[in-house]
Image (cartoon, rainbow, N blue to C red):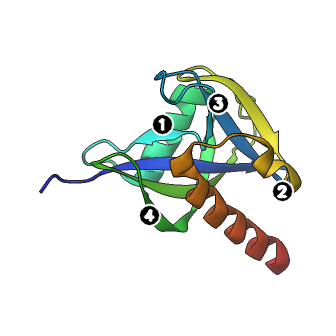
Amino acid sequence: MTERIVVVGAALFDGGRLLAARRSAPPDLARRWELPGGKVEPGERPEDALVRELREELGVDAEPLAPVPGEWPLRPPYVLHVWTARLRPGSAAPAPLQDHDALRWLTPAEVWDVDWLDQDVPAVRATLARWATEARGS
């Protein structure tokens, strides 16, 4: 049995908006939207991978907040874990530096205006459920 590889995705929030990133590669994923992030390296904690990937892909300094409950299958052997995160004070604004050609900040009403990758849809739904719960609690 192949060992699974965790991909960590960021539900990056700012001012009540969620960041979506449009893929530029590979060709079968290009022009579709995802939660930014990437593979967790051996021995790396998921929250550290999230900070590293967001720095590499978007040029930001982010702070992981909490995992979104759930695990979503990608193509084997990859599985997606999502963490909520926010920009640290003084962070640069996100820019599509690596693997993306566009970014959009989406309000809750706009989240389904973009064409999410099929494998990200259940993770986005879970993120929205958590977002709504946290908004009611605050």
Label 3, on which residue? 22
Query: Dot 2, how many residues are within 10 Å of its Cα: few (below 14), some (14-19), or many (20+)?
Result: few
Q: Name the residue at 57% across, 60% down.
A: 122
* Residue type at tag 3: Arg
Query: Dot 3, how many residues are within 10 Å of its Cα: few (below 14), some (14-19), or many (20+)?
Result: many
Query: Dot 1, how many residues are within 10 Å of its Cα: few (below 14), some (14-19), or many (20+)?
Result: some
Q: Name the residue at 70% across, 70% down.
A: 129
Label 1, on which residue? 52
Sequence order check, earlier mark of 4 and 3: 3
Sequence order check, earlier mark of 4 and 1: 1
Sequence order check, earlier mark of 2 and 1: 1
Label 4, on which residue? 71
* Residue type at tag 2: Pro
Label 2, on which residue? 108
Question: Rounded to the nearest whole Å, what is the CA distance between mark 4 and mark 1?
Answer: 20 Å
Question: Circle 2 — which element?
Answer: helix
Sequence order check, earlier mark of 2 and 4: 4
* Residue type at tag 4: Glu
